[in-house]
Amino acid sequence: MSQCAYCKRRPIIEGFKPFCSKRCADLDLGQWLTGGYAIPTEESGPDQHSNPEEFDPYKPAND
Ligand SMILES: [Zn+2]
């Protein structure tokens, strides 16, 4: 029998193939995402340098 693709310790459960549980499926997916490009970070956010003054909460709005 095959074992969980993530923890490699428990047998695969039919509903969570190829994992043993939703937890392992989620963990594996999270690991895959964070290792790729799906999680935006502050150092690579597309809006990081786009006119920060417009978002200054202390700046009164000009009528
Ligand atoms: Zn597992």
Image (cartoon, grey):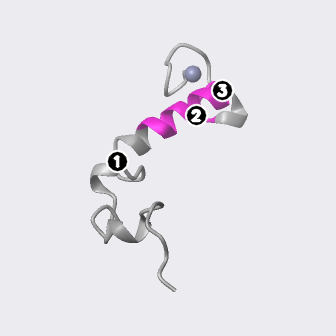
CB atoms of marks 2 and 3 within 8 Å: yes
Left or right of 14? Residue 50 is left
Q: Vertically, is 28 above or below 20?
A: below
User: In the picture, residue 50 is in which quadrant?
Assistant: bottom left
* Mark 2 nearby-residue class (10 Å; few <14, some 14–19, many ≥20): some
Image coordinates of residue 30 in percent, x first then y, are: 48, 38
Task: Tell me how far mark 1 sits from mark 2, CA to CA.
Answer: 17 Å
User: In the picture, residue 4 is in which quadrant?
Assistant: top right
Q: Residue at x 34, y 65 (%)?
A: 52
* Mark 1 nearby-residue class (10 Å; few <14, some 14–19, many ≥20): few
Secondary structure beneath label 2: helix
Question: What label sits on residue 21 in the rendered view?
Answer: 3
Q: Quadrant of the N terminus?
A: top right
Q: Vertically, is 63 above or below 40?
A: below
Secondary structure beneath label 1: loop
Q: State yes or no: Cβ of the residue under disc 1 lies below 8 Å from any atom of ligand 1.
A: no
Task: Tell me how far mark 2 sits from mark 3, CA to CA.
Answer: 6 Å
User: In terms of sequence position, does the residue under pointer 1 or pointer 2 come before the other?
Assistant: 2
Residue type of the residue flagged with mark 1: Gly
Q: Which residues are magenta?
A: 17-31
Secondary structure beneath label 3: loop
Q: Residue at x 66, y 31 (%)?
A: 22
